[in-house]
Amino acid sequence: MTAPRERLDEVEERLLAAARVRSSRLREDLAAWVAIPTGRGHLEGIERQREAIVDRLAALGATARRIAGDPRPPWLHGSEAGTSRAIPDASVITTPGAGPAFLLVGHLDTVHDPHGAFQRLEEVGGGRAVGPGAADMKGGILVAVAALEILQELGHAVRWTFLLNADEETGSFHSARLLDAEARRHDVGLVFEPALPGGALAIARMGAGQFRLDARGRAAHVGRDFTEGVSAVTALARCLVKVPEFSDPSAGRLVNVGPISGGAATNIVPDHAVAWGNVRFADPAAAARLGRDLASLATPPTAMPSIAVEFLANRPAKPTTPAVEAIANEAAAVSRALGRDLPFATTGGVCDGNILHQAGLPTLDNLGVRGGNLHRLDEFVELDSLVERTALVAILIRRLSLAGAPRRDR
Ligand SMILES: [Zn+2]
């Protein structure tokens, strides 16, 4: 394979110019989108945000359909306070055409309180603006949409599908099956999560999973028949002190416990206690080891007290593969041609790119904006990355489109 070109050709120069022309419109669009509250299951805002994006893509001749989500595993209920039980639809917006098929993925949901004080995009100096979801990932979806627009404006037909889900921040349980199915129908995956610190591109991610430890005991009044009682809280606590031993960061295994709950009143021996937790793992072997370790806490269901264990590795690890490396090298070459290094990095953070990877789709998953302080009340975007990433994405898509479909990872 020849090394990726470090200079822009004439057509790419025109794409860059088209991105620059949009500079102020990109900022206005971002401000408008950030002002739509889409956090914590706020379906009304999610619908408005969906419409704003679908309208833009429909103007490019794309057709949109809605896909109903799958339910979450019932044992996860209670694991995330404030999470809505409503299941949001996903949207699949697609254009026909020839050449390699690109799957662009963005999540409509954010983590921010839809009724809190953090509601607007505000410039704070230093080329930055803070706002809920400005980087994660309204800015990212915006640069993707703008890249498709300028490609079409300049007459470059590209075959793409845009998948919008609304449950990424809570684990993509509703949309995982759809992500997997679409990944199998496409040739290149692009997810628009924000850049890692330093503007870096993630070329490998750990996987993630969820678990629940459910302890059952026997209730009894503390004063009248204490000795008849069997405390589920004590049984759970005995397990919880073992759980940290399952972590081994140097071996790519991380375990976090919480939230936990148990008991109903101080004068009753509690008959039920439950803890949820999250694991991260570097590879399938580490995931399997965590599954075995957690399962070792389980008792027979008839034991008193009893412990039941649920575990689901819902986001597989995303190691670097030759196909990902080739696309990443092309992205880095384009970035350098645009005047900025695109360093590579690995992360324990997971995203929908993990799911696409598992389906064998070569995927870059954080070509969104540069920014930081994600999920915090000072989440920010580097404003000049709006133009930069619009140009980067458009030029990268064109290059990959001309090169033909890459070999799939599996
Ligand atoms: Zn995100």
Image (cartoon, helix red, strand yellow):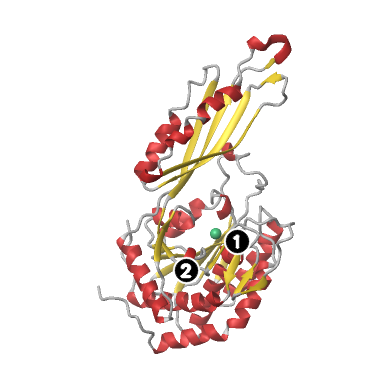
Between label 2 and label 1, give the one nearer the viewer: 2
Q: Provide residue 76's location: percent of width, then percent of height.
A: 58, 40
Q: Is residue 261 left or right of residue 390?
A: right
- Mark number for residue 199? 2
Q: CA distance from mark 2 to mark 1?
A: 22 Å
Q: Is residue 81 left or right of residue 362?
A: right
Disc nearer the start of the sequence (2/1): 1
Q: Quadrant of ligand 1?
A: bottom right
**Would residue 295 be seen by someone viewing this image from the given angle?**
yes
Q: Is residue 17 left or right of residue 334?
A: right
Which of the image's four quarters has the N terminus? bottom left
Q: Is the CB atom of the residue marked by disc 2 within 8 angstroms of ligand 1's nearest atom?
A: no
The residue drawn where x is 38% and y is 71% is: 100
- Residue where numbered disc 1 is placed: 108
Which of the image's four quarters has the C terminus? bottom left
Looking at the rendered structure, the number of numbered marks drawn on it comes to: 2
Residue type highlighted by circle 1: Leu
Within-10-Å neighbours for mark 1: few <14, some 14–19, many 20+: many
The residue drawn where x is 48% and y is 64% is: 197
Q: In terms of secondary structure, where does tag 1 sit?
A: loop
Q: Report the front residue among 75 and 101.
A: 75
Residue that lies at the very extreme toward the left in this rendered image = 1
Q: Is residue 346 depicted above or below 234 in this figure?
A: below
Q: Report the front residue among 85 and 281.
A: 281
Within-10-Å neighbours for mark 2: few <14, some 14–19, many 20+: many
Q: Is residue 253 depicted above or below 237 in this figure?
A: below
- Mark number for residue 192? none
Q: Provide residue 74's location: percent of width, then percent of height.
A: 58, 38
Q: Report the front residue among 222 and 92.
A: 222
**Would residue 61 be seen by someone viewing this image from the given angle?**
no
Q: In terms of secondary structure, where does tag 2 sit?
A: helix
